[in-house]
Amino acid sequence: MYKQLSSGVKISITRSISTSFEAYLASISWDEDKFSMEDYMVSWQKYFKENAAWIDKIPTEVLLSAEFHEEIAKKMDEVINKILTEAPTEKQKKEIDKLQKQLGTDYQFDCKAEAAYVEQLLKDKLK
């Protein structure tokens, strides 16, 4: 069912998963101990209901289908895995290192998305 959707809808679904996942992680300050898949799912549902135009482009019978939900769950796993395994860029590492020296902090980060969060956090502290 998912594979039969237009590429634009599939891109929008992927974007809503990644955007909502990164926003959820920011809301818990990327603290693994605070992570709850159930809380993320609530956050994702709220996000796509309020922000995602793709929901209106999928027939109701597809949205209610167990097969579609299984396929979306697989897509979520793929997107989340990609987010968590994409390495920070050298530019991010250098910028964070510079900011941490200025602020005397020692934030750790493991992936590109977390590095973006830390970099913004440090820039906000400098303001």
Image (cartoon, rainbow, N blue to C red):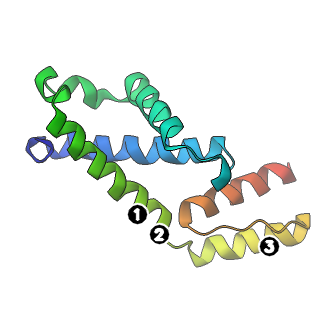
Residue at the location (28% across, 51% down)?
A: 75
Residue at the location (43% across, 48% down)?
A: 18
Q: Are marks 1 and 2 in contact (CB under 8 Å)?
A: yes
Residue, disc 2: 86
Q: Residues within 10 Å of mark 1 (few under 14, many from 20)?
A: few
The reply to whether residue 30 is in sight is: no
Residue, disc 1: 82
121 left or right of 69?
A: right
Which amino acid, by three-letter code, is at mark 3?
Lys
The reply to whether residue 59 is in sight is: yes
Residue at the location (15% across, 21% down)?
A: 60
Please identify, in this view, whether the residue under mark 3 or under mark 1 is nearer the observer. 1
Q: Secondary structure at mark 2?
A: loop
Q: Spatial distance from mark 2 to mark 3, Cα to Cα?
A: 22 Å
Above or below, comparing residue 64 to residue 22 in the picture:
above
Q: Residue 6: percent from the left, percent from the top?
A: 13, 42
Closer to the camera, 27 or 94?
27
25 left or right of 15?
A: right
Q: Spatial distance from mark 1 to mark 2, Cα to Cα?
A: 6 Å
Q: Earlier in the sequence, mark 3 or mark 1?
A: 1
Q: Secondary structure at mark 3?
A: helix
Q: Secondary structure at mark 1?
A: helix
**The disc label shown at residue 98, or none:** 3
Residue at the location (84% across, 51% down)?
A: 125
